[in-house]
Image (cartoon, rainbow, N blue to C red):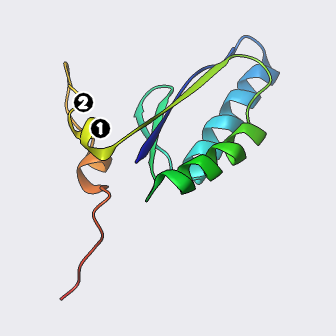
Amino acid sequence: MRLLVFFDLPMNTKEEKRIYIKFRKFLIEDGFMMLQFSVYAKIFPNRISLVQYVESLKRNLPKKGSVRAMAITEKQYENMLILVGGKTMQEQTVSDEPMVIL
C-alpha cells in the first residue's frame, strides 16, 4: 500500500513559509519521498498500519491550505503513467519488496 499526500499551502508571509517548511520536513522525516513538488508518497506494509498512520498525520496538519491523501495499492502505483520525465533515483531504488540476503 502507498499513501499519496498532495498539498497546497499558502506561502505569502514568513509565518506561512515556516509552516510549509515544517509540514514538508514532517513528511520527509516520517519516510515520505517526494514524487513532485507538493506530492509525497510513503509505503505501508498493510492497510491497518496505513489507517493508523493517517490518524497521526491528521494531528500534524497545518491549519490553512489544502492537504489531500489517497491510498493506492502497489499494483496501482506501478501502473501510474509518467507522461513527461522519468522515475527519480529514489523511486528506482525504493520499493515494497523486502531485501533478501543469501
Which residue in the rendered view is the most extreme toward the top?
12
Residue pictured at 40% horizontal, 48% vertical: 1
State whether residue 20 appears in this view: yes
Is 53 placed above or below 4 here?
Answer: below
Q: Which residue is mark 1?
A: 77
Q: Which residue is mark 2?
A: 80
Disc 2 residue crowd, few under 14, some 14–19, many 20+, Cα 10 Å? few
Along the line of sight, which residue is nearer the eye, 76 or 8? 76
Q: What's the amino acid at mark 1?
A: Tyr
State whether residue 60 appears in this view: no
Determine contact: label 2, label 1, CB under 8 Å.
Answer: yes
Q: What's the amino acid at mark 2?
A: Met
Residue 33, given in percent of the width and then of the height, sits at 44, 44
Callout 2: helix, strand or loop? loop
Residue pictured at 62% horizontal, 50% vertical: 53
| Image quarter hosting the C terminus | bottom left
In this rendering, the count of numbered labels is 2
